[in-house]
Amino acid sequence: MIAVEALSKRFGAVQALDTVSFTAPDGTITGILGPNGAGKTTLMRILATLLVPDAGTALVDGHDGTLEPIVVRQRFGILSDAKGLYPRLTARENVDYFGALYGLPKEQVSARRDALFAQLGMGALTDRRADGFSQGEKMKTAIARALIHDPQNVLLDEPTNGLDVIATRAMRELIRELKNAGKCVLFSSHIMQEVSAVCDPIVVLNHGRVVAAGTPADLLRASGCATLEDAFVSLLGSAEGLVA
């Protein structure tokens, strides 16, 4: 479970996060939705222990990332927007390397990797170098690498970016399987359709603040709109008025 309480972060004159609070339970896909510049990436980097908050706490399975960064990293599988693949390594080598970093036995890494590659339709990529991969091929390799150690908590930043329709459907199915396995999944996006397709509770950020939170039905009631896309636009507009 991820529990965020009054999390704040400033970069110079920019207040990237302003007392953000929410809970992401196990067995749930929690959506983090917001326009570009809303604070989603800053939030993800703090959860991943890459940034230290100015105030507030972020607990992962009860562990504070500021005080216990190594423990938190071990409990996370992280897919960032940067991907970060080693271009001279093959897909297999990229994933196996991270399995070794987590201290997993070679047999366990091999079995886990083969299962993930089959699930993501990566057979043709196995022994190709990452240099020259398409965006979708990079994404598949990065998600396999993030899940190689079977983490309890999974942080996904724009996981369907660059994927075609078939690969997007496979990714959504994989995310739902993580939920069914009792994992805590945090799904960040600025695309309403992607969030509404897989997420249970949704946390809407704008200008570093939580402007709305709840199930899709909750957001529709709060906005008085008939569609989630209209609700999203309405809630952001209301928040802009409050900020102004």
Image: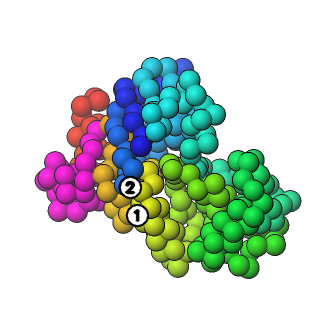
Horizontal relation, residue 107 to residue 25: left or right: right
Q: Which residue is mark 2?
A: 27
The spot of residue 177 in percent (x, y) is: 45, 67
Q: How many marks?
A: 2
Q: Which residues are magenta?
A: 211-230
Q: Is residue 23 visible?
A: yes
The image quadrant of residue 211 is top left
The spot of residue 127 in percent (x, y) is: 81, 72
Q: CA distance from mark 2 to mark 1?
A: 6 Å
Looking at the image, tell me whether mark 2 or mark 1 is earlier in sequence order. Answer: 2
Residue 68 part of the magenta-drawn span: no
Q: Secondary structure at mark 1?
A: helix
Given contact means CB atoms under 8 Å apart, are the residues at marks 2 and 1 in contact?
yes
The spot of residue 172 in percent (x, y) is: 46, 68
Residue type pointed to by label 2: Gly
The spot of residue 148 in percent (x, y) is: 65, 58
Q: Secondary structure at mark 2?
A: loop
In the image, residue 125 above or below residue 161: below
In the image, residue 43 above or below residue 198: above
Residue drawn 53% across the image and 59% down it: 159
Residue drawn 34% across the image and 33% down it: 21
Which residue reaches farthest right? 88
In the image, residue 182 above or below residue 49: below
Residue type pointed to by label 1: Asn
Q: Quadrant of the N terminus?
A: top left
Q: Which residue is mark 1?
A: 180
Residue drawn 50% across the image and 28% down it: 64
109 or 232: nearer the viewer: 109
Q: How is the image coloured?
A: rainbow
